[in-house]
Image: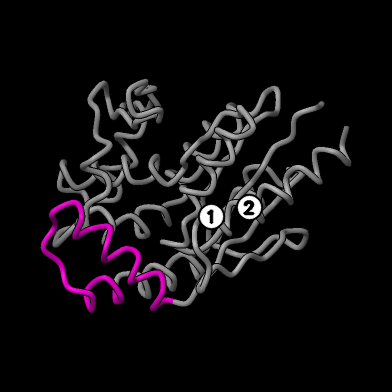
Amino acid sequence: MGKITVAIDGYSSTGKSTIAKQLAKALNYIYVDTGAMYRAVTLYAIQHNYVGDQEDIAGLVNDLPDIKLKFVPNKALEISEMHLNGKNVEREIRNMEVSSHVSKVATIPEVRHKLVEMQQQMDTEKGIVMDGRDIGTVVFPDAELKLFMTASPEARATRRYKELLERGEVVSYEEVLENVQKRDFIDSTRKTSPLRKADDAIEFDNSDMGLAEQFERVFDYTKRIIAEKS
């Protein structure tokens, strides 16, 4: 049976990465978390004081050739973790400070160009599941299956809030909801590769859906497309 490319786009905290990981594992495909890539660049920008109270976007752009990103498999956890310039930063890139700046960093054309180029190089022989904001519209416009994940801001904020608490972060629900809404606005209105549903993407609202039901539906879509393309 032939392999396909699966592009999963959508708003923050819609469970894109969770579904993409499950799908890749079930299909024995490669999974790529593009959000982790943008988060890693954002972490670099924070560490070098390029974002925050005083911004230095030119400085970040100038440093882009020195930013090395790599997904390194963690066999014990059965996941691939993000390494930034040789250091495992998987935990650091998931905190609220990075979340508060990542959408802004992702609007920088030079950053998007660098990461899109890296992402496109990963799909040389199909058999890949990639999630992000512009996968079906920019990175892989010819992907055989495109999904667009959405949910209400309140449902997404609740999921994110619980996730952060489980990691030991001190944060309020209101703060998380504000961050979700702010990221939605920035992602949807940026000039370079704004978040939007591809014309041929399947919209998937999971506001009131559990993970098991979500995966079952997505897996059914995928098996049907693979059968059609074989």
Q: Which residues are magenta?
A: 153-178
Task: Say what amino acid the circle numbered 2 marks.
Answer: Glu
Residue drawn at the location 34% of the way across and 71% of the way down: 157
Q: Which residue was labeled with disc 2?
A: 216
Quarter of the image that includes the C terminus: top right
Helix, strand or loop: magenta stretch: helix
Task: Say what amino acid the circle numbered 1 marks.
Answer: Ala
Residue drawn at the location 29% of the way across and 47% of the way down: 42
Instruction: Identify the secondary structure beneath mark 2.
Output: helix
Q: Quadrant of residue 214?
A: bottom right
- In the displayed structure, would residue 124 be above or below residue 107? above
- In the displayed structure, would residue 85 be above or below residue 171? above
Residue 175 on image: x %, y %: 22, 74
Q: Is residue 228 left or right of residue 121?
A: right
Residue drawn at the location 72% of the way across and 45% of the way down: 222
Q: CA distance from mark 1 to mark 2?
A: 6 Å
Q: Mark number for residue 212?
A: 1
